Amino acid sequence: MTISVKAKPGSKVDLFEIDAAGQLTVKLKAPAQEGRANAHLIDLFARELGIHKSAVTIVAGFTNPHKRLDIAVSAVDYDRFLDRIRTISASGGS
């Protein structure tokens, strides 16, 4: 499955958010230097989805905050992941 995300490197916390337009935004503690933010993005998605890092690939946007990721996960599992993010966002991010 291919998804679009907006990455915000150099943030104080690692956090997934969904904005009012439905865009998935990922705040990353890692800086946007020497591919560290991209590597951290892959690691974060793999950890949150419970899959191997090799199942997450950046297919576009290597040097851009707007990225397309190819993720080897079922649509059902990805929808559960999005529901968790919406629930956390609705409760104030805790």
Image (cartoon, rainbow, N blue to C red):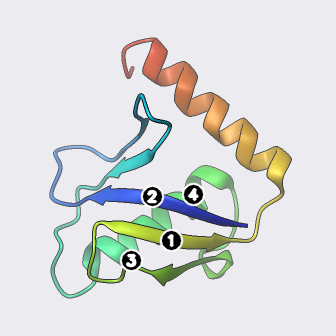
Q: At 46% from the left edge and 44% from the top edge, which residue is drawn? A: 23
| Residue 11 spot, x, y in % from top left | 17, 50
Q: Which mark is residue 68?
A: 1
* Residue at disc 4, secondary structure: helix
* Depth order, front residue of 47/42: 42
Which residue is painted at 40% across and 33% down in the image?
19
Secondary structure of residue under mark 1: strand
Q: Is residue 20 left or right of residue 27?
A: right
Labelled disc at residue 47: 4
Going by the numbered disc 2, the residue's amino acid type is Val
**Alpha carbon of mark 3 to alpha carbon of mark 1: how far?**
14 Å
Q: Residues within 10 Å of mark 1 (few under 14, many from 20)?
A: some
**In this view, the mark in front (3 or 1):** 1
Q: Relative to residue 92, is residue 16 depicted above or below?
A: below
Answer with left or right where residue 43 lies relative to residue 36: right
Q: Residues within 10 Å of mark 4 (few under 14, many from 20)?
A: few
Q: Disc 1 residue type?
A: Arg
Cβ atoms at labels 2 and 3 below 8 Å apart: no
Element type at mark 3: helix
Q: How far apart, in angstroms, are the residues tagged by discs 2 and 3?
A: 14 Å
**Residue 5: image x %, image y %?**
45, 58
Position above or below: 88 against 27: above
